[in-house]
Amino acid sequence: MRKTDINKYAGSHGSGASKSIGRIVSKSLLTIFTIVFITGLIVSISLFSFIFSLKNETMDYDLRKLQLNYTSFIYVNGPGDDSAHPVQYQSLYSNENRVWVNYDKIPKAMKDAIVAIEDKRFWEHRGVDWKRTLGAVTTLFSKGSSYGGSTITQQLIKNVTGDKDVSLTRKVKEIFRALNLEKKYSKEEILTAYLNIVNFGSGCNGVQSAANLYFGKNIQDCDIAECAAIAGITQNPSKYSPLVHPELNKERQQTVLKEMHDQGQITDTEYQTAMKKSEHMTFVGKKSENVVNNVPIWNWYVDTLFEDVKEALMEHYNCSSEKAVDMLYHDGLKIYAAMDPDMQAAAEEVLKSDNVFGSDKKLQAGYIAMDYNGRVLAAIGSRGEKKSNRLLNLATTSKRQPGSTIKPLAVYSPAIESGKYTFSSLVNDSPLPNWFSDGRPGPKNWGPGNTSGKYWGKIPLTWALERSLNASAAQIGSAITPNVSYNFLRDKLSFTSLVPADNDRAPMAVGGLSEGVTVREMTSGFAMFGNGGKYYKPYTFYHVDDHDGNVILDNRGQIPTQAIRSTTASIMHRLLNNVVTGAHGTGRGAAISGWEVFGKTGTTNDEKDSWFIGGTPYAVAGIWTGYLTPKHLTNTTYAVSTWKKIMSKYLQNKPKVKFTYDPNVVSAYFCTKTGLLANPHSDGDTQLGWYDKNNMPATCDGVHAGVGSAYTSLSNESSSNGEQENLSDPGDDSVPPEGSQNSVPNEDSRASSPPNSRKEQQTQNERTTHSIVPAG
């Protein structure tokens, strides 16, 4: 082949190859472009569809009816103030302390400060500040950091919905929600909601709570510097809290002031004045040990009140405990408490003392004080400093064996009420057979025993109660039957701690109950001895209002139960006064000079529980002492002495008043050997008693044969096997003086001799007063 032909052939083939490669590249590029275009189109359509689907995204909340976590408030009358002028005492919140305040009550400086530092174009944009949003996106991609581009409107949405996820979907939703929110609400409504919701540190949500905590004033009274200090907290509430980091708060505050000045919201003079004040800011709130997780530690009364309101809300709304608690913390309730600050302060002062029980630091106590109409004046759930809220309350929820304090309620009151017993009726202080009739094996079934180890035979009822003799109480309880005692406690005094098994237990007469009782139950029962025999359900609040001021719970106007006749109450009052004033009274340590006192001691036979319940003209109070895990007490007198300390402090500045008694109760001397009314020829063994004039005993004829026969110690045949009931009260019975077993010093000095004539007897009978209610 010629060379020219070869060259021609080679040239034509080379050109064809180049064209083929070009066509391949072109097709590839076209394919790639087509794929990219189609993919981009699909992505764009999808993105557009996604965004379009969110364009109507709204927030399912009505700002005008926004139900937030409103702080609830407790109001009480001030110390020494029994008038109806309640003052704010305590706020209730779990972790958000919020008080709503309207737009017109928020000062201009506060609005300007928050806008200046959080969203300076707030009044211009329509929910989204696009300039800040683009800047935030640029910063995210260029520096990899998150720069806040959210407006006040967007921040409001995050706070209300709680939706704070870091995602593109959430951000797009938030943008559309903000745009739509501003179509529905005015700027003023949005800013008002924001200023009432945002976190201002230390558990404060909203500017009103912040102003109250940090400056002790309402937000409307805050000046420019104070508003700037509050506004500076929002970016980082922990970092800029003025209570925790005052220097950092000052720096942030000054930044806010500069922004306000630069944006023309304050003048040069206002700026200089505020900056000067910022150098020496004073914050009234304290970082206190009485605050846990931003929640203040309540006193025991508030703890008791909280639980009572919770139970009332559960009943009123037929709701769960959780729902009721949520309402208390978040529904902005106004609770008007019945607490007496003077009595509460007296009880706290005594029971917080390290040496209230000597060197014994583990001995505990529960205390309740009431007036005679059911109002709980004070409550202490345990001794010492309170460390948290809603703890075990030894006064209201802890059930303990009552010992002899139950006797006036379960035995003596029903007995006097029956009309079969009087102040001086002879009772048989002797053991009962089959005392342990609840199934205990063995023949040792006589009881109960008295502390002295002796039985005293037939003695006046008043002596038995004064000395707290177990056998006498058991004999009376057996005579009226345990069923009567059980029904009286349950139906007349509303004891809820009883169980059906107690209905058949003879030991109930001396405090042997299946589960025990609470201090509040016992104290409310004893109140009938000072108010004419009425039972009032104890209450810690007068009424509770909802956030809008509507009364939803109300204890005012309570109609009492007439538990016993007024005459019975007067007689019981006199009997219990002898426990405190009598020569052999077990409650002598409770006597307060210049004051009338009635009461009853109680100690369980294993000495694991010690009580005293007693009253003065102003209040009735009960105290229990013992250990959380029951064990033997080394000192059983602390209940009486502590009761006296608290009551004495409470009464020290009170005007002296006296109890009054039912006019149908009259005084008369009785023969201590027969329990009958004394006559002019009685031999001197007489004492003053108190009687319903419609149920007077007969007059003693002077024949005392067979009266006062003594029982010997438990070693005698009838009682040698009488081991004591585990839960019964040993009593604190005093041993009569040597000589005649029934020869006891007169409890009343006026009874040194019997009346000398019927005229004197009549005069004595007329020495009466009126129904037992505090006078004055």
Image: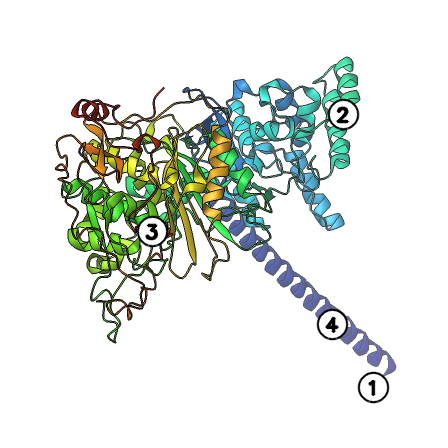
Q: In this rendering, is residue 689 above or below 138?
A: above
Q: In this rendering, is residue 582 above or below 724?
A: above
Q: Earlier in the sequence, mark 1 or mark 3?
A: 1
* x and y, in percent, of residue 735 in the image: 37, 52
In-front residue for pair 711/608: 711
Q: Earlier in the sequence, mark 4 or mark 3?
A: 4
In-front residue for pair 675/554: 675
Q: Quadrant of residue 276?
A: top right
Q: Which residue is mark 1?
A: 1
Q: Depth-wise, is mark 3 or mark 2 nearer the camera?
A: 3
Secondary structure beneath dot 1 equals: loop
Q: Label 2 neighbourhood size at 10 Å, few (<14), some (14-19), many (20+)? A: many
Q: Label 1 neighbourhood size at 10 Å, few (<14), some (14-19), many (20+)? A: few
Q: Which residue is mark 3?
A: 739
Q: Earlier in the sequence, mark 1 or mark 2?
A: 1
Amino acid type of the residue that numbered disc 3 sits on in the rendered structure: Gly
Asked if marks 3 and 2 touch (Cβ < 8 Å), the reply is no
Cα separation between marks 1 and 2: 105 Å
In-front residue for pair 207/720: 720
Secondary structure beneath dot 3 equals: loop
Asked if marks 4 and 1 touch (Cβ < 8 Å), the reply is no
Secondary structure beneath dot 4 equals: helix
Q: Earlier in the sequence, mark 2 or mark 4?
A: 4
Q: Depth-wise, is mark 4 or mark 3 nearer the camera?
A: 3
Residue at position x 48%, y 28% from top? 183
Q: Which residue is mark 2?
A: 278
**Left or right of residue 85: residue 35:** right
Q: Which residue is mark 4?
A: 16
Q: Is residue 385 visible?
A: yes
* x and y, in percent, of residue 39 in the image: 57, 57
